Amino acid sequence: MRYLQTFNRRLRQMREAGRLSCQDVAEICGVEEAQVKSWEASDVRQRTYPDVTALLDFCIKTETPLENLLDLAGSGDEGQLELPGLAFSESDDLSNALKELEKEINRVQLSGEEVKLLRRFRKTTEENRRMILQILGA
């Protein structure tokens, strides 16, 4: 998975820059916190990678371009991108797969109001975020 060689470091840097915990990322991606920790594992033997749904959830909900997480430069496969959980054989119907991918993107797309709330939440203090999460029962 040459596209994911530095994914663990990139994800951690983005998470910390956005002042997100592993639990925050887990909630965004719809996975367990332990999975996020394994995505960021420095030991390659303990590292796992997100599936396409979790990767898209993170990118869309945090407004992070996919190329910021993946190693695309110098891949040698210009125009070709292999993502975990999204693979095609010659017999696959690409148009059906693209329709499914579009449905998934639409499912996780944030509304304008949700984007505003997320931005305000990120800009507030740690104490305010904790209080908001307590109120929400998270």
Image (cartoon, rainbow, N blue to C red):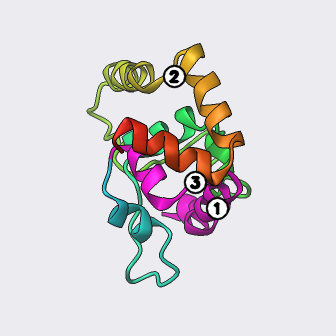
Q: Residues within 10 Å of mark 3 (few under 14, many from 20)?
A: some
Residue 14 visible to the viewer: yes
Mark 3 sits on what residue?
20
Q: Nearer the viewer, residue 129 or 73?
A: 129
Q: Is residue 16 above or below residue 136?
A: below
What residue is at 34 percent from the left and 66 percent from the top?
A: 34
Which amino acid does the dot numbered 1 rest on? Answer: Arg
**Which amino acid, by three-letter code, is at mark 3?**
Leu
Q: Type of residue at label 2?
A: Leu
Image height of 132 relative to 83, above or below? above
Magenta stretch contains residue 33: no
Q: Which mark is residue 10?
A: 1
Q: Nearer the viewer, residue 73 or 23?
A: 23
Q: How many marks overall?
A: 3
- What range of the chain is rendered magenta? 1-30
Which residue is identified by label 2?
A: 110
- Separation of disc 2 and disc 3 at Cα? 18 Å
Of the numbered discs 2 and 3, the one sitting upstream in the chain is 3
Q: Residues within 10 Å of mark 1 (few under 14, many from 20)?
A: some
Q: CA distance from mark 2 to mark 1?
A: 23 Å
Q: Position of residue 104 (x, y in %)?
A: 37, 26
Give the residue at x 51% y 45%.
Answer: 131
Q: Residue at x 64, y 61 (%)?
A: 10
